[in-house]
Every structure is written in structure tokens, then in C-alpha cells.
Image (cartoon, rainbow, N blue to C red):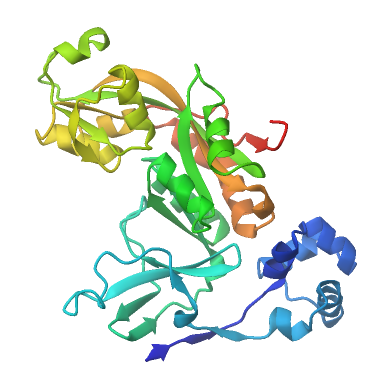
């Protein structure tokens, strides 16, 4: 049994992106302004009959193809990844809650998980063979990103306040976030491999994993280092291997793992692995480990001592072809906003002097 709700759809952006056109190119072809194209795609402007006909003519389709109401059926979507305990695997399992979001013209169903902004309302539930969709919000109104920024909840709240869109921030390491972007399952991926000593490492990583045609939006410069319980003697970077500490690490592909490998010349001292910065701090605070690599903000949150190791450049990687997507436009505007930059600068371990800068990754970069 499938329950669906009829949604007014606007396929202008989908048709435009399919053809690789910018909003300016579509505006010229349709004989309307770029501002009007943007407003129509965002659902803030209902086009006149004449404008709708011009848009349809530019695409070589009918007006109905662009604007007719169409139900968004839950069974039209695919899982972004399998739920950890789906009802088909475990008949007695709790029904699986999900979010819906459109990424690159495809609607994905995301299993609900804790996000950087806490637990968000779900759009529907899969219970056995029954899919119940609750939300009236169209999937094109949700932006999905992946990163390990411990302050990303501030971005999510400021983004929603400013734009009216929903931002779902999935907690993933830099490499895992990039992999999801490569698969077309998120709109943007956060990475922070670059340092003052290797300032182009984020660019090199994107070129290696994804190629060209991407933009890097600077989120912040932040401080990474060692966290440990205040009762322990002050750690010394020079002789970490001889201090007999129990270390908690991070998964392969994370910047924190790379930092720890550099400190120990590739000889990892860890047996326990945490999934994010707060997992590292939790393991140290609760005595499962003596030390680990995490963000300064998180170390302070957990009342731990902190020894700074290096500053890292955190960037959002965004496909250049999606720069005209109203949700991406809103993301860039939010990151550049004075209110968000002030919120971020008030936190320990953040430097926002370059926040909002954009670097294009193309063949010559």
C-alpha cells in the first residue's frame, strides 16, 4: 500500500539542469529576465501564461510538462542507502522513518539519523510494505550536505531562518562526504585536508576523487589538536609514542586520522575508532581512551584539555553546474552572511576571515 500526496511541481530547474544551461542562458532563450527565471524556479513567482509558453518553447516541451501538479509517490524514490534495520530484514523491527530530497533531478529517500542540528521531523515512514508519506513539503525544498563540522547545526538553523528551505546535515568524514557527492546523494560535501603547510590539499583531493567542474566554498579555518583529560600531565608532541597513552582514532579517510598518522609517522597507536569529533571527546572524557585528535570546539564542550596541532581549511565542495540551484544560492548567501560569520567567530577554534570565498576547480587550477 502506498500513500502519496499531490504536490504542485515546478520542473523548470530540472529541465534546465538536464540541458546544462545556466539561468542566464535560459532567460535569453525564453526572452524573460534571469531574475524571473530564478524566482520561478524557487516557487516565489507564478509565471504568466506568456512566460510559461516561452519557457516551454525554449525547452521544446509543453507547459504541462513544466507546471502540472503531479503526486510525488514515495515508491518512485530509491533509498540513498539501505536502512540499518529495515522491516524487510527484521520483521519485528521499528518502522523506518525517512526524509525526501531531490538531488540533481532525482528524489532520494534518506533513513532518518541524528544530524548536526539534532533530530529533524521526518517526511514519512516505511512499515513493512506500507509507505506513509506525511510531509507536504516538496523534495526540491530540501538541501542535503555531509560533513564533520561540529558547528554545522548553526549553519542549518541560520540557513532555514534566512531561506525558508530545510537543510539536512549528515555527519560524515571528509572522504565519506566526498563519496556521497560523487554518487549524487548530497548537494555539497565538507572537507578539511588543507593546512597552511599544504593549502591546496582540498583542491588536490577534489581533483583526484571527482575531477573538475566543482567549486570550493570556504567554510572556515579551524583548529585541530589533541584532547585529553585535565588530570593528565600536559602532553608533549615531541615524544607522544613514549607516553604510554591509550588513543582513540578516526576512520580511514578522515582528516583527523591523517593528522594522527602524521604525528606517529604512519604507525597508528589506536584500537578504538570514533565516527566524529564528539565521539573522540566522549571516549576520552569517559575513560575509554586517554587522548585523541578532535576539533578545539569539541574539546572545550566536553571539558577536556586541548593541545593545538594545526589549523585546517574547511571547504564546501559544490558541483559548479548546481550553482544556480536556489538551495545552493541560499547556502552561499548564508555562509557569507554577517550573522552566520559572527556566530562562527564567537566559537573557540574558528577563524572566519576567508569564510565565503569561492575557488573554482577547473582544468587550469
| Quadrant position of the N terminus in the picture | bottom left
Query: Whole-percent x and y of residue 159?
Result: 51, 52
Q: Is residue 311 left or right of residue 14?
A: left
Query: Whole-percent x and y of residue 71?
Result: 55, 85
Looking at the image, the residue that sits furthest to the bottom is 1
- Which residue is pictured at 14% across the width and 25% down the height? 229
- Which residue is pictured at 46% across the width and 52% down the height? 180
Q: Is residue 262 left or right of residue 228?
A: right
Quarter of the rendering containing residue 238: top left
Height in image: 296 above or below 95? above
Residue 301 visible in rendering:
no
Query: Whole-percent x and y of residue 310?
Result: 39, 19
Height in image: 267 above or below 35? above
Height in image: 100 above or below 333? below
Residue 327 visible in rendering:
yes
- Which residue is pictured at 52% across the width and 34% down the height? 205
Q: Nearer the viewer, residue 11 or 51?
A: 11
Amino acid at each position: 500500500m502506498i500513500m502519496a500526496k499531490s504536490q504542485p511541481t515546478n520542473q523548470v530547474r530540472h529541465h534546465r539542469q538536464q540541458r546544462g544551461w545556466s539561468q542566464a542562458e535560459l532567460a535569453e532563450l525564453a526572452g524573460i529576465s534571469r531574475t524571473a527565471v530564478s524566482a520561478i524556479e524557487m516557487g516565489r513567482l507564478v509565471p504568466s501564461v506568456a512566460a510559461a509558453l516561452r519557457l516551454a518553447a525554449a525547452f521544446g516541451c509543453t507547459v504541462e510538462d513544466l507546471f502540472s501538479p503531479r503526486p510525488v509517490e514515495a515508491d518512485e524514490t530509491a533509498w540513498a542507502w539501505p536502512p540499518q534495520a529495515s522491516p524487510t530484514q527484521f520483521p519485528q523491527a521499528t518502522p523506518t522513518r525517512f526524509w525526501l530530497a531531490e538531488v540533481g533531478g532525482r528524489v532520494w529517500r534518506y533513513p532518518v539519523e541524528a544530524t548536526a542540528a539534532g533530530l529533524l521531523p521526518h517526511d514519512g515512514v516505511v512499515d513493512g510494505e506500507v509507505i506513509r508519506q506525511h510531509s507536504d513539503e516538496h523534495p526540491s525544498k530540501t538541501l542535503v550536505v555531509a560533513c564533520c563540522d561540529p558547528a554545522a547545526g548553526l549553519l542549518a538553523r541560520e540557513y532555514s531562518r534566512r531561506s525558508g528551505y530545510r537543510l539536512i546535515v549528515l555527519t560524515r568524514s571528509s572522504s565519506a562526504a566526498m563519496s556521497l557527492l560523487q554518487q549524487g546523494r548530497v548537494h555539497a560535501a565538507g572537507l578539511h585536508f588543507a593546512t597552511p603547510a599544504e593549502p591546496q590539499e582540498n583542491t588536490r583531493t577534489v581533483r583526484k576523487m571527482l575531477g573538475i567542474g566543482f567549486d570550493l566554498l570556504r567554510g572556515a579555518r579551524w583548529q585541530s589538536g589533541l584532547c585529553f583529560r585535565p588530570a593528565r600531565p600536559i602532553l608533549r608532541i615531541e615524544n607522544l609514542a613514549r607516553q604510554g597513552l591509550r588513543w582513540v582514532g578516526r576512520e580511514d579517510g578522515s582528516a583527523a586520522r591523517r593528522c594522527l598518522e602524521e604525528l606517529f609517522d604512519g604507525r597508528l597507536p589506536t584500537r578504538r575508532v570514533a565516527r566524529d569529533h564528539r565521539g573522540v571527546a566522549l571516549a576520552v572524557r569517559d575513560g575509554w581512551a586517554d587522548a585523541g585528535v578532535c576539533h578545539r570546539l569539541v574539546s572545550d564542550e566536553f571539558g577536556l584539555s586541548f593541545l593545538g596541532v594545526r589549523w585546517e581549511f574547511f571547504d564546501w565542495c559544490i558541483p559548479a553546474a548546481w550553482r544556480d540551484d536556489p538551495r545552493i544560492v541560499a547556502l552561499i548567501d548564508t555562509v557569507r552572511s554577517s550573522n552566520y560569520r559572527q556566530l562562527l567567530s564567537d566559537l573557540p577554534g574558528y577563524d572566519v576571515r576567508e569564510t565565503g570565498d569561492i575557488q573554482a576547480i577547473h582544468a587550469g587550477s
